[in-house]
């Protein structure tokens, strides 16, 4: 067998494994999704869900379609958006620390949201709009500060960490200065929460996610290196900038919809990569992993901890040890 045939066989096996992993993740999401619709203070038999979702009436139909379904759909789309955004950042910049909640994008959303809540008494859509504007503005600022001579992974991460630290200080100052009621409202938002989420939160994510997945081919080319990507016909800087804008927009809309749900963007891509193995996976496994993490985390936070908690409490408890482990392993390898 020639070298070309060997490479082709390896790629085929990798593609098959990536599709199998994606299918298993999708099945797991469907199972958790159905259970999240059925379980609660008003339990609903799983067998009744299809009838309730498609034309059912009565109290059970109201609970499922008006209260639980928007929350579950928002959780899936928010998780997929965070997972895709984290995968784009980490793969484009070739740095496992490059996720929106590490390099300052979600801190920008948080700072803008806290300003809106504490200084202007805002709530609901106004807070979401402020978070969206804050994330987009922070992303643009980080890019402009890091773009000298082209965007490089460690430079953008360092700039982002610095900007994020400043914005975190702003949030801390406002929280200590604010009225107790407003500070409590801001703290709930900062934790990351799916309570009371409706259909208006999911429309932008439903549009952006397909656009991001369509860019997988450009991402695969950029991962081969700038020279190889240019040889394949890609306009390297334009393609990289387009993907970074999509990554920031996904993180911005996801944060606006559910708050800065901790560490989902950070852990989704590494988990998906380990599941796929040595294959060069597209964005779909990372998106599905993020969706499963948020959906499962929200179910655990609502039903398995003795009290109803925000989903960010669970994802933070999972993600923080992973961050420490990653830093420790990178330090042993001499990379940090």
Image (cartoon, rainbow, N blue to C red):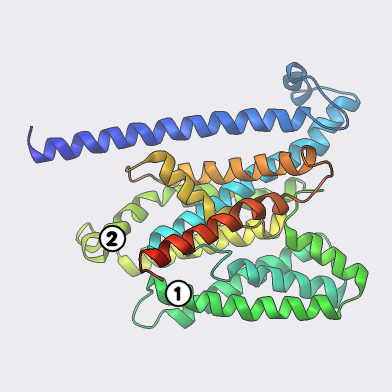
Q: Nearer the viewer, residue 82 or 172?
A: 172
CA neighbours of label 2 inside 10 A, class few (<14), some (14 to 19), many (20+):
some
Rendered residue at 54%/75% (across/down): 161
Q: Position of residue 38 (x, y in %)?
A: 77, 27
Which quadrant would residue 110 be assigned to in this image? bottom right
Q: Is residue 280 left or right of residue 42?
A: left
Quadrant location, the N terminus: top left
Rendered residue at 77%/65% (across/down): 127
Task: Find residue 310 and name its label.
Answer: none
Quadrant location, the C terminus: bottom left
Q: Is residue 125 left or right of residue 328?
A: right
- Residue 290 visible in the current orientation: yes
Q: Residue furthest top?
A: 47
Above or below residue 83? Residue 104 is below
Mark 2: which secondary structure?
loop
Mark 1: which secondary structure?
helix
Q: Is residue 303 left or right of residue 159?
A: right
Rendered residue at 80%/64% (across/down): 187
Say which label, 1 or 2, has the lower sequence index.
1
Above or below residue 48? Residue 239 is below
Q: CA distance from mark 1 to mark 2?
A: 22 Å
Q: Nearer the viewer, residue 100 or 63?
A: 100
Callout in the foreground (1, 2): 1
Q: Residue furthest left?
A: 2
Q: Nearer the viewer, residue 57 or 12?
A: 12
Task: Find residue 156 and name its label.
Answer: 1
Question: Residue at label 2?
Answer: 234
Q: Position of residue 97 (x, y in %)?
A: 48, 64
Question: Do callouts 1 and 2 mark residues in contact (Cβ within 8 Å)?
Answer: no
Which quadrant would residue 15 be assigned to in this image? top left
Q: Position of residue 86 (x, y in %)?
A: 51, 57
């Amino acid at each position: 067998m020639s070298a070309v045939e060997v490479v082709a066989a390896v790629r085929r096996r990798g593609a098959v494994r990536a599709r199998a992993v994606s299918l298993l993740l999708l099945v797991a999401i469907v199972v958790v999704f159905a259970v999240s619709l059925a379980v609660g203070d008003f339990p609903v038999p799983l067998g009744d869900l299809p009838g309730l979702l498609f034309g059912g009436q009565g109290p059970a139909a109201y609970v499922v379609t008006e209260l639980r379904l928007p929350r579950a759909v928002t959780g899936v789309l928010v998780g997929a958006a965070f997972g895709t955004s984290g995968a784009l950042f980490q793969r484009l910049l070739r740095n496992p620390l490059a996720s929106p909640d590490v390099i300052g994008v979600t801190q920008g959303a948080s700072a803008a949201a806290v300003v809106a809540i504490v200084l202007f008494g805002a709530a609901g859509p106004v807070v979401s709009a402020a978070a969206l504007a804050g994330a987009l503005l922070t992303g643009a600022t980080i890019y402009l500060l890091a773009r000298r001579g082209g965007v490089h992974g460690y430079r953008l991460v360092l700039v982002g960490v610095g900007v994020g630290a400043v914005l975190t200080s702003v949030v801390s100052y406002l929280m200590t200065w604010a009225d107790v009621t407003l500070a409590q409202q801001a703290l709930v938002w900062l934790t990351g929460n799916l309570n009371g989420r409706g259909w208006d939160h999911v429309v932008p994510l439903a549009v952006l996610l397909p656009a991001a997945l369509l860019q997988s081919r450009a991402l695969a080319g950029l991962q081969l290196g700038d020279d190889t990507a240019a040889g394949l016909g890609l306009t390297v800087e334009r393609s990289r900038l387009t993907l970074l804008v999509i990554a920031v927009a996904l993180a911005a809309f996801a944060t606006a919809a559910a708050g800065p749900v901790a560490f989902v963007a950070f852990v989704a891509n590494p988990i998906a990569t380990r599941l796929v193995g040595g294959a060069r996976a597209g964005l779909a496994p990372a998106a599905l992993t993020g969706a499963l993490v948020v959906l499962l985390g929200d179910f655990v936070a609502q039903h398995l901890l003795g009290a109803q908690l925000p989903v960010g409490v669970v994802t933070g408890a999972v993600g923080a040890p992973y961050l420490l482990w990653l830093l420790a392993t990178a330090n042993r390898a001499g990379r940090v």
